Amino acid sequence: MSNLIAKSNEIKVGFDKPRSDVSYAWGEGCNKADALVLKEALFHLKDSNGKTVVEQLKERGFDIETLKLSIKKLN
């Protein structure tokens, strides 16, 4: 189980060390489909060189295990 907790109208993304994977959490007003938009952008969409955002960040020396992202809906 992820240690991420999202507030109402918020999506959180972060690396879950116990699972050794990126986890997603969504609060009331958001849902799994909303979180999947972020997952698609980070891990599946590729640039003209065929690399995802995460692959590009790793190549630039970033530690994905420190990944933290949150976004709130406009009210």
Image: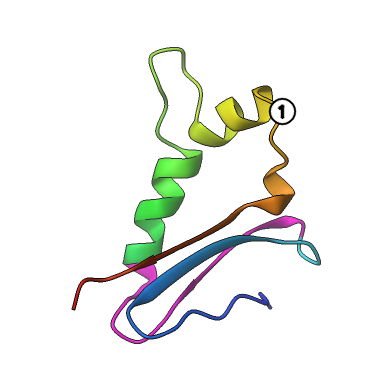
Q: Taking 68 as reference, is 41 left or right?
A: left
Q: Residues within 10 Å of mark 1 (few under 14, many from 20)?
A: few
| Residue 73 against residue 20 in the figure, above or below | below
**Residue on which the image places disc 1:** 61
Image x and y of residue 44, in percent? 45, 37
- Residue most extreme to the top: 49
Residue drawn 40% across the image and 21% down it: 47
Residue drawn 21% across the image and 71% down it: 74
**Residue nearest the observer in this picture, 58 or 43:** 58
Residue drawn 57% across the image and 36% down it: 54
Image x and y of residue 66, in percent? 70, 52
- Residue most extreme to the left: 75
Residue 21: within the magenta? yes
Which type of secondary structure does the marked residue at label 1 adopt? loop
Image x and y of residue 16, in percent? 71, 64
Residue drawn 68% across the image and 77% down it: 3
- Residue most extreme to the right: 18
Q: How many marks?
A: 1
**Color theme of the render:** rainbow
Q: Quadrant of residue 20?
A: bottom right
Q: Quadrant of residue 60?
A: top right
Q: Taking 6 as reference, is 66 left or right?
A: right
Identify the magenta region: 20-33
Residue 44: within the magenta? no
| Residue 18 against residue 55 in the figure, above or below | below
User: Please, what is the three-letter code of the amino acid marked with disc 1?
Assistant: Gly
| Residue 7 against residue 47 in the figure, above or below | below
Q: Quadrant of the C terminus?
A: bottom left
Image x and y of residue 4, in percent? 61, 75
Q: Quadrant of the N terminus?
A: bottom right
